[in-house]
Image: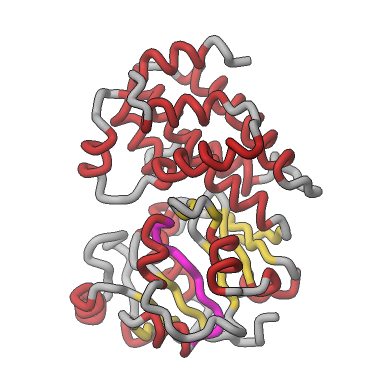
């Protein structure tokens, strides 16, 4: 269980990490922030803003304890909120020599570990021995850019025990953020992974010139596909029409702030995957998730035509217009 008044750290310095710092500083006097680049730390201390991400967000730097050493920040905090791209998570924790015993690890990462094909909580449970009781997730239809603008948003806090979820909720609730509790760690994590793949599909179709009518059909089918995969692989009492599942899928598929939709749009317009990845300033988690899910689904053999279409385009170099034309015949 999380102790009362826990010491909280955010691991990562991108858009979502910056947004989380903004939220947390509404409710806590001091938050620890792991930023790998010492020059970025110096800039934030001197200017009160992140030079690369959400630069409009202002911080009182004297309320932030900065760290560039993963061992130091882990040792000095009780709750670790992970907000780095899944592809870089192993590198961030590779230097860790200390123990995670007694730490509560919260994933705010909507991705899967490439190569290991594990969600973030699975990875920390199996690699670092963090008990399931000490693992949680922060998710929901919540873009960092709208947090920066203080537009009303909803986050779902997921943990095995409601008491831990309530403790985290108190840290994250503020005038423009409301929180919801769930105990469906598996379902919420995989919903976060899958919705990025389907957002890539939506972006590809947008880049090819498909309109809103087809996009609506595509996302309706994507929701059915997501629900089928999650319910078959991990039966649980869950309502996937809730915002953390369906809402997140919709906002990622339609929003101007969706980096996965942006990546997909570039692919649909003719960019190679290498060119699209190079040009984007941020990581599109759906790119890595597509390959991971393809491997995972070899064990389950669940029919997932949209996810497979995205994989075929990204990794088998099938022309997007061919793949999406074939896919359109399968829509319902």
User: How many labels were placed on the picture?
Assistant: 0
Could you tell me residue 184's position as x and y percent? Answer: 71, 55
Task: Report which quarter residue 221 is drawn in.
Answer: top right
Residue at the farthest right position: 237
The foreground one among 56 and 68 is 68
Specify whether 321 is left or right of 164.
left
Q: Position of residue 277 (x, y in %)?
A: 27, 42
Q: Which residues are magenta?
A: 77-86
Residue 182, placed above or below residue 229: below
In the rendered image, the vertical position of residue 64 relative to residue 152, given as above or below: below
When asked about the image quadrant of residue 73, the answer is: bottom left
Is residue 182 found inside the magenta-colored segment of the image?
no
Q: Is residue 22 visible?
A: yes
Estimate the x, y position of residue 321 in percent, counting from the top left: 36, 15
Task: Name the residue nearer the viewer: 59 or 226.
Answer: 226
In which quadrant is the C terminus drawn? top right
């Amino acid at each position: 269980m999380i102790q009362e008044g826990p010491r909280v750290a955010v691991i990562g310095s991108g858009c979502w990490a910056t947004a989380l710092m903004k939220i947390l500083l509404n409710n806590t006097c001091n938050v620890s922030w792991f930023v790998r680049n010492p020059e970025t730390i110096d800039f934030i201390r001197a200017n009160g803003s992140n030079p690369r991400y959400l630069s409009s967000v202002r911080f009182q730097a004297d309320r932030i304890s900065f760290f560039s050493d993963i061992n130091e920040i882990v040792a000095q905090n009780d709750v670790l909120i992970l907000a780095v791209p899944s592809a870089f998570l192993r590198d961030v924790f590779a230097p860790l020599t200390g123990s995670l015993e007694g730490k509560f690890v919260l994933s705010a990462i909507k991705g899967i570990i490439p190569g290991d094909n594990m969600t973030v909580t699975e990875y920390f449970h199996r690699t670092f021995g963090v008990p399931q009781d000490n693992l949680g997730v922060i998710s929901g239809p919540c873009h960092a850019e709208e947090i920066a603008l203080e537009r009303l948003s909803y986050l779902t806090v997921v943990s095995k025990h409601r008491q831990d979820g309530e403790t985290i909720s108190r840290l994250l609730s503020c005038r423009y953020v409301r929180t919801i509790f769930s105990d469906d760690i598996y379902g919420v994590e995989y919903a976060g992974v899958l919705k990025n793949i389907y957002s890539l599909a939506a972006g590809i179709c947008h880049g090819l010139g498909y309109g809103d009518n087809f996009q609506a059909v595509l996302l309706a089918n994507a929701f059915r596909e997501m629900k089928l995969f999650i319910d078959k692989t991990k039966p649980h009492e869950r309502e996937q029409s809730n915002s953390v599942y369906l809402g997140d899928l919709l906002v990622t598929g339609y929003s101007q702030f969706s980096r996965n939709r942006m990546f997909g749009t570039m692919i649909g317009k003719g960019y190679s995957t290498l060119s699209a990845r190079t040009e984007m300033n941020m990581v599109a988690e759906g790119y890595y998730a597509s390959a991971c899910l393809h491997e995972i689904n070899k064990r389950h053999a669940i029919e997932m035509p949209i996810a497979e279409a995205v994989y075929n385009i990204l990794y088998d170099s099938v022309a997007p217009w061919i793949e999406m034309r074939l896919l359109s015949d399968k829509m319902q």
